[in-house]
Image (cartoon, rainbow, N blue to C red):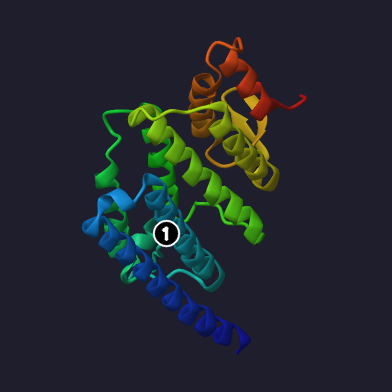
């Protein structure tokens, strides 16, 4: 009885969350159509992340209350298929993906494409990690939006980038690591790092070198060892 009540409650909440996301998505689309100069790639990254949070909530719902059956043989859906069987979610995924067409980076930056591709995939299947700590989720989103924005403006749009701009980005990343860092394998090393670290570090290295120029030697190595600390065996 209690489980059915909770299922009904969270089901209605998900519907409301989905409607709210749809309004947010439409609002950004309208801004692009009205005057694209008012929209940044950071705005699109933020909407992508919010979609990932929404899909993660659906995953948590079905992990708790069970996935529906996909055929008469009793086989059930899984979180990889959320955008296939949840009504309207697949359509929102298509609309969200279309936003990136206004900031096409496919032929300009392999490093940025790798990050965006993994975030996009994790958001689609519910694997964009969401913590119970709202501050942690805020800092994660802020950092990813700031990083993508800074990298896009600097490496692709050729805008000036300095230590003054790099410092708050570094501070934002450190908060992200403090909240979401965990032990994981990075190549052959066990490291302490947050989600998407393998894509974030190369981007941070590039921005670091631009900000500091020739003032520091072996920048990528120093930065990598700062953020990806090898654990004791």
* Residue at left offset 57%, top offset 37%: 169
* Residue 108 x/y as whole percent: 30, 28
Locate residue 168: give its quadrant: top right
Q: Nearer the viewer, residue 152 or 82?
A: 152
Q: Nearer the viewer, residue 172 or 202?
A: 172
Instruction: List the single residue furthest toward the left.
Output: 33
Instruction: List the single residue furthest toward the bottom.
Output: 1
Q: Is residue 229 above or below residue 72?
A: above
Locate residue 133: give its quadrant: bottom right
Q: Nearer the viewer, residue 1 or 155?
A: 155
* Residue 6 x/y as whole percent: 57, 82
Other residues around mark 1 within 10 Å, as few (<14) / some (14–19) / many (≥20): many
* Residue at left offset 29%, top offset 49%: 37
* Residue 202 x/y as whole percent: 50, 26
Q: Nearer the viewer, residue 75 or 112?
A: 112
- Which residue is identified by label 1? 51
Q: Is residue 91 above or below residue 208?
A: below
* Residue 229 x/y as whole percent: 69, 27
* Residue at left offset 65%, top offset 29%: 227
Quarter of the picture containing the C terminus is top right
Image position of 20 (left or right of 232): left
Residue 52 in view here: yes
Instruction: List the single residue furthest toward the right.
Output: 232
Q: Secondary structure at mark 1?
A: helix
Total marks in image: 1
* Residue at left offset 44%, top offset 45%: 119
Residue 84 in view here: no
Quarter of the picture containing the N terminus is bottom right
């Amino acid at each position: 009885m209690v489980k059915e009540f909770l299922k009904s409650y969270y089901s209605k909440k998900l519907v409301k969350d989905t409607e709210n996301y749809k309004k947010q998505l439409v609002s950004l689309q309208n801004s692009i159509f009205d005057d694209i100069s008012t929209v940044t790639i950071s705005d699109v990254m933020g909407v992508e992340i919010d979609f990932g949070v929404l899909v993660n909530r659906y995953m948590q719902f079905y992990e708790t209350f069970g996935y529906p059956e996909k055929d008469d043989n009793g086989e059930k859906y899984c979180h990889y298929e959320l955008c296939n069987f949840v009504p309207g979610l697949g359509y929102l995924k298509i609309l969200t993906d279309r936003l990136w067409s206004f900031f096409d980076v496919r032929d300009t930056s392999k490093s940025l494409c790798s990050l965006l591709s993994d975030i996009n995939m994790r958001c689609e299947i519910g694997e964009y990690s969401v913590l119970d700590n709202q501050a942690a989720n805020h800092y994660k989103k802020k950092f990813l939006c700031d990083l993508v924005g800074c990298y896009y403006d600097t490496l692709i749009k050729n805008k000036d980038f300095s230590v003054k701009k790099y410092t708050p980005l570094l501070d934002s990343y450190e908060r992200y690591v403090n909240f979401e860092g965990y032990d994981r394998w990075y190549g052959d090393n066990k490291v302490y790092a947050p989600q998407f670290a393998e894509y974030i570090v190369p981007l941070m290295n590039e921005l670091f070198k631009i900000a500091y120029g020739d003032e520091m030697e072996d920048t990528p190595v120093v930065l990598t060892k700062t953020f990806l600390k090898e654990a004791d065996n």
